[in-house]
Image (cartoon, helix red, strand yellow):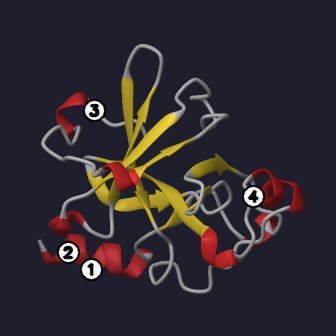
Amino acid sequence: MKVLPELYPTDLEAPHANAFTLPAGIIGFENYRHAELLYQRDHLPFLWLKLTGPRDVVHFVVIEPGGIIPGYELELFDEHALALDLNDASEAMVLNIVTMKRSTPVEATVNLVGPIVINRRTRVGRQVVISNYSLYSAHHSLVEKTQAVGNVAAR
């Protein structure tokens, strides 16, 4: 999700340890190859993914799916695991892009089909289409419909 300028996390700093490269960029942003994860404790589990391109910067909202998306078990194609030089599943950090509209944040969705997988050891990442993509959606609701209706009614 590309966010509006006034929503950019300009006051957040990313420690050097939160930087990584995306040699192929991500879909639609192939020239944005330098990435940093930014966060504020009161925004967790949401993180900001800052991508730097040749002329500007874009931000995306992302989450690490563990503990948030029950039963999400992604499987990588062998060529993606090899390209990322993953020796073990524990080396992989998974980020999923969140899409939300300011007017209806309870309708936020997350892309479970095309996560960004980062090798924690090499700090190189890649957006991939998972091999078990048929089990998931690129528009998975973060809030169940019954919860969203209850939250709106409570206002």
Q: Is residue 76 above or below residue 69?
A: above
Residue 68, x across and y down, in percent: 45, 79
Q: Which residue is mark 4?
A: 85
Query: Badges 4 and 3: C-beta atoms under 8 Å apart?
Result: no
Residue at mark 4 to residue at mark 2: CA–CA distance: 49 Å
Quadrant housing residue 26: top right
| Disc ID at residue 153 | 2
Secondary structure under the numbered disc 2 in the rendered image = helix
How would you rate the neighbour count of disc 1 (Cα within 10 Å): few for under 14, some for 14-19, many for 20 or more?
A: few
Q: Which mark is residue 150?
A: 1
Between label 1 and label 4, give the one nearer the viewer. Answer: 4
Q: Position of residue 49 (x, y in %)?
A: 40, 47
Mark pair 4, 3: CA separation: 35 Å
How many numbered marks appear? 4
Label pair 1/2, CB-CB below 8 angstroms: yes
First of labels 3, 1 by sequence position: 3
- The numbered mark at residue 4 is 3
- How would you rate the neighbour count of disc 3 (Cα within 10 Å): few for under 14, some for 14-19, many for 20 or more? few
Q: Is residue 125 left or right of residue 108?
A: right
